[in-house]
Image: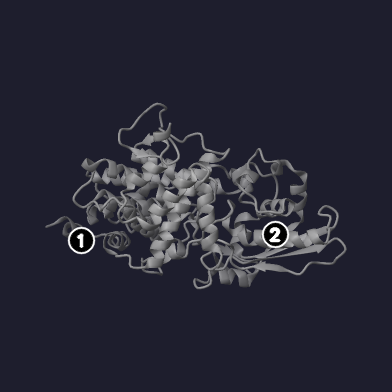
């Protein structure tokens, strides 16, 4: 009996086999998906360079133990570090995610009672960062391409095209689970899905058999999972910037353990009492309303501002109001009575905050702070505006305006947000003056960066070049973009990464 037949002979949770079958057998035929994948990879690399160039660069980038060297390891882009693929996956994902400027995808994450006590499923998009998976994919693909002895006959060609295929499939797995499964409702952070998706595609990159991939995926579900506490209230902190990296690191480790011969638990989800459904998911089973294909990458939001994604339409509306208020010479301190924000339920739940804001992670997840800074600055905030060193962090005008901003749910906006065809992020703002007069309401349905916004493609391309240009010369930026855009099928992963690595120029 061969390996696949042996696996099928044992009772196995269908979800595990569906994920593995998709990764190993599905052929991507959508030109749009591959175009979006190229953009996602370049955007993620740009976000990593932005993190490295910022004052908030994490101090833990590099080997776990200072001075340790890895021969023929993953060459971490933008740095001189040569890392093992486990730490490399962590660092790459952290650099992509840390400033909250990378892509996002909405998913059903909460059962939330509205003011009418109706059940309302809410999507939490800001932290559901599908590009986290690029950390594990790029690190493992580069490491394998430098070490032929680590590959097998089943290892796919280690080209940029293979990275893009793995990217599409990791996005799809994570996103399809997010659509209708509320991990947040049981206290878990969404990065559990990064771990599962990355474990699946890393198994494929390593050349494991399909049944070994099932084992690795089961290990990911069996693993301990992080609480979401670090994204909420007084516990909001920088861990949200490295949680995805932690999931990527663990996914690579679990896939490597599987390669070494460690078996999985084939009913890890459905086993009575001890399985995921009974022990963690309160007896519920997963709902996968869509078949795995390429839909997620085609509908991913690219963020043009490093702030929580649910704030983006409100931010754009505030910019329009700022110009109106400036033309009317409005005194922001004395003339404004209140600012009302109509938005969808997810924004109300996640980023409607009052009281002290303790750190950058707290500020970039506070709608009132984001809108106050936008109004005072007359421009969208950048990553520096959320840091402890930012003058806005201690500006009394920001706190004064935060108190004036009232956020409430518009039921229609919530319905449009949940609608899979519309996928709206609408918000509408009105300034009510102290004398009782008010501006006309300014509404924005799709922010720049949404696949439904006509200006997204040009804006994301500019963002990519701007961020890559923080580290690389114009000629290098053009080479990087051209390689991914037009030479993905013929360029080995290590050739692209060598261009991105700074060790050669040290």
Neighbour tally class for label 1: few under 14, some 14-19, many 20 plus, Cα within 10 Å: few
Asked if one can make out residue 226 in the rendered structure from this viewpoint, the answer is no
Question: Looking at the image, which residue sits at the far front?
Answer: 475
Q: Which residue is mark 2?
A: 319
Question: Looking at the image, which residue sits at the far right?
Answer: 435
Asked if one can make out residue 351 in the rendered structure from this viewpoint, the answer is yes
* Residue 46 spot, x, y in % from top left: 49, 48
* Residue 505 spot, x, y in % from top left: 42, 34
Nearer the observer, 317 or 247: 317
Rendered-image quadrant of the C terminus: top left
Nearer the observer, 140 or 471: 471
Q: Which residue is mark 1?
A: 8
Left/right of residue 78 with respect to residue 273 in the rendered view = right
* Residue 471 spot, x, y in % from top left: 50, 41
On residue 321, which mark appears? Answer: none
Residue at the location (68% across, 53% down)? 379
- Label located before the other in sequence (2 or 1): 1
Question: How far apart are the two marked residues, 2 and 1, measured between alpha carbons?
Answer: 57 Å
Rendered-image quadrant of the N terminus: bottom left
Q: Is 51 located above or below residue 154 in the figure?
A: above
């Amino acid at each position: 009996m061969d390996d696949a037949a042996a696996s099928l002979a044992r009772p196995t949770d269908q979800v595990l086999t569906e994920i593995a079958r998709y990764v190993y057998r599905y052929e991507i035929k959508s030109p749009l998906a591959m175009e979006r994948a190229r953009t996602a990879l370049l955007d993620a690399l740009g976000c990593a360079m932005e993190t490295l160039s910022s004052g908030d660069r994490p101090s833990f980038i590099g080997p776990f133990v200072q001075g340790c060297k890895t021969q023929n390891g993953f060459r971490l882009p933008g740095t001189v570090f040569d890392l093992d693929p486990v730490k490399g996956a962590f660092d790459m994902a952290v650099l992509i995610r840390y400033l909250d400027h990378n892509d996002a995808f909405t998913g059903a994450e909460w059962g939330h009672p509205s003011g009418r006590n109706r059940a309302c499923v809410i999507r939490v998009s800001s932290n559901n960062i599908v590009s986290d998976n690029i950390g594990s994919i790029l690190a493992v693909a580069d490491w394998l391409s430098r070490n032929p002895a680590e590959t097998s006959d089943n290892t796919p060609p280690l080209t940029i095209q293979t990275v893009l295929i793995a990217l599409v499939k990791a996005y799809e797995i994570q996103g399809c689970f997010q659509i209708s499964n509320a991990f947040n409702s049981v206290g878990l952070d969404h990065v559990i899905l990064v771990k599962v998706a990355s474990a699946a595609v890393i198994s494929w990159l390593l050349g494991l058999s399909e049944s070994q991939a099932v084992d690795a995926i089961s290990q990911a579900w069996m693993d301990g999972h992080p609480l979401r506490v670090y994204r909420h209230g007084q516990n909001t902190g920088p861990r949200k910037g490295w949680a995805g990296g932690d999931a990527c690191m663990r996914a690579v480790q679990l896939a490597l353990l599987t390669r070494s011969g460690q078996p999985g638990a084939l009913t890890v989800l459905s086993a009575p009492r001890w399985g995921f459904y009974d022990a963690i998911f309160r007896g519920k089973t997963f709902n996968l309303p869509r078949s795995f294909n390429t839909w997620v990458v085609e509908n991913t939001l690219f963020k043009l501002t490093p702030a929580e994604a649910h704030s983006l339409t409100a931010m754009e509306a505030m910019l329009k109001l700022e110009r109106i208020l400036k033309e009317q010479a409005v005194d922001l301190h004395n003339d404004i009575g209140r600012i009302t924000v109509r938005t969808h339920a997810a924004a109300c739940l996640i980023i409607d905050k009052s009281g002290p804001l303790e750190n950058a992670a707290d500020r970039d997840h506070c709608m009132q702070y984001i809108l106050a800074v936008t109004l005072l600055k007359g421009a969208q905030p950048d990553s520096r505006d959320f840091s402890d060193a930012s003058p806005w962090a201690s500006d009394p005008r920001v706190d004064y305006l935060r108190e004036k901003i009232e956020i409430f749910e518009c039921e229609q906006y919530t319905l449009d947000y949940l609608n899979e065809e519309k996928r709206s992020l609408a918000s509408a703002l009105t300034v009510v003056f102290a004398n009782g007069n008010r501006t006309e309401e300014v509404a924005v349905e799709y922010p720049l960066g949404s696949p439904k916004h006509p200006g997204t493609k040009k804006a994301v391309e500019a963002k990519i070049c701007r961020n890559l240009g923080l580290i690389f010369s114009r000629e290098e930026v053009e080479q990087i973009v051209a390689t991914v855009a037009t030479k993905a099928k013929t360029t080995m992963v290590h050739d692209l990464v060598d261009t991105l690595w700074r060790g050669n120029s040290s």
